[in-house]
Amino acid sequence: MKELELKYGCNPNQKPARIYMEEGELPVTVLNGKPGYINFLDALNSWQLVKELKEATGLPAAASFKHVSPAGAALGLPLDDTLKKMYFCEGLELSPLACAYARARGADRMSSFGDWIALSDECDESTAKVIQHEVSDGIIAPGYTPAALEILKSKRKGNYNIVQIDASYVPAPVEHKQVFGITFEQGRNDLRIDEGMLQNLVTENKTLSPEQKRDLVLCLITLKYTQSNSVCYAQGGQIIGVGAGQQSRIHCTRLAGNKADIWQLRHHPKVLALPFKPDVSRPNRDNAIDVYISDEYEDVIGEDVWAETFTTRPEPLTAAEKKEWLSKVTGVCLGSDAFFPFGDNIERARRSGVTAIVEPGGSIRDQQVIDTCNKYGIAMAFCGLRLFHH
C-alpha cells in the first residue's frame, strides 16, 4: 500500500489528509481503528525513539507520546513494590516490555492521559494487560502476539488504534516537509547516540557510573525526538520529567524539574497511603494526587470533592515535608538538547537531585556553567551535538 487516507489533518477543517510514499510501500499497517494525522506523527516519532533506545542499550523500550513529544520514555527494568503501587501494577506479572511501558506512562501520568504508545519489541500479553486499563489513543509496535492483539482490540469499544511497523524499514537519507507552500529539505538526523558521546567530561568530577551513563544516553535519545527547546531528567532507567517546546532554556529546566519533583513526591508514604475509595478511576486518582502534592490542596479540595474521592480526608503534605523529602533526592541525570547559557540552569537542576549532566557545550559562558557544576560536585559531559527537533 502506497497511501492511507486520513479523516482529517491536525484539525477537522483541514481536509483532505493522507500519508503516502513517493516510492515504495508504506512501512505501517493499521490492524485496528482509524489513526489520524496527529496519531501518525506521534507514532512515527515515538517508534524512532524506542528503536534507538533498544539499539543503544539492548533493553526493551517504551514511550508515551502526546502532541509529538514524549511525556515519558523508559527501559524494561524491573519495578520495585513502590513503583508497582505508583503505576497501578500491583498483582500483575510484568514482562520486561510491560515494565518499560509502566515506567514510561508513570513518568508524568497527567500528561500521558490519552497517549500514543510505542514499543520497541513485539507487544506481549503482559504489556497489553498494563495498557488495557489506561486511557490511550493508540499504539505502534513491530508486532503483537495473538493474545495481546485480542486484549488491545477490546479497548475503546473496539476502536483502539493499533499500528504495526516494519522494523526493517529504513527511511531515505534526505527528508522533506512543506510549510506555507514552501518545501524544506534536510538530511535526516540519523546520528547514532551511545556512551561514546559522554567521554568529554569538562568538570572536576570526571566519574560516571554505568547507571548514570545509561540514563544520560536515555536523556539524549529522548531529547532527539522532543520538540525544542527541551530538557529532560532521568533516574533508574526512565525519564522522570520532560520540559518541551519552551522558548527559554531555564523555563525548560524548571518545567522538567517540577515534573521530576512531582514524580519524586509520588514516592512519599503519605501519597502512597492516600485513602481512595475503591470505585475512583485511575485518571481521577492521578488528578487527586496531583492536587494533593500541589501547594493548592487546602484551597482546591473542597468538602464535596474529597468526600467523593477519599474514605477520609487526608492530612496535607506540608511544604516542610515536601522540602525535606526532596532534599534527600540524589542520583538524577539531566540532558539538554542545546547548551546551557547560564549557571541558573544548574542551580535549578541541583534542587531536583541532579548529579550528572550532558549537554552540547559551546556557550560563551561555558565556564560559568562548569564552575556552577563544580560548586556542587556535579559531573558534566559535553557531547558536542545539538539535538533540536521541530
Image: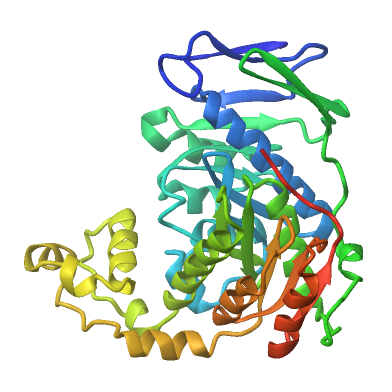
Tally of marks: 0
- Tell me which residue sits at (60%, 23%) in the image: 30
Q: Position of residue 4 (x, y in %)?
A: 62, 13
- Is 188 placed left or right of 220 in the picture? right
Q: Is residue 90 visible?
A: no
Residue placed most toward the observer, 247 or 49 = 247
Q: Position of residue 99 (x, y in %)?
A: 60, 62
Q: Is residue 145 visible?
A: yes
Screen quadrant of the C terminus: top right
Name the outermost residue toward the front.
364
- Is 56 placed left or right of 64 in the picture? right
**Splitting the image into 4 quarters, where does residue 114 fall?**
top left
Q: Position of residue 270 (x, y in %)?
A: 33, 83
Protein image colouring:
rainbow
- Is 332 placed left or right of 364 in the picture? left
Screen quadrant of the N terminus: top right
- Tell me which residue sits at (92%, 64%) in the image: 196
Name the outermost residue toward the top.
16
- Tell me which residue sits at (40%, 45%) in the image: 135
Residue placed most toward the observer, 315 or 258 = 258
In this rendering, the answer to whether 288 lies above or below 186 is below
**Splitting the image into 4 quarters, where does residue 332 fall?**
bottom right
Q: Position of residue 254 (x, y in %)?
A: 52, 66
In this rendering, the answer to whether 108 lies above or below 26 is below
Name the outermost residue toward the left.
304
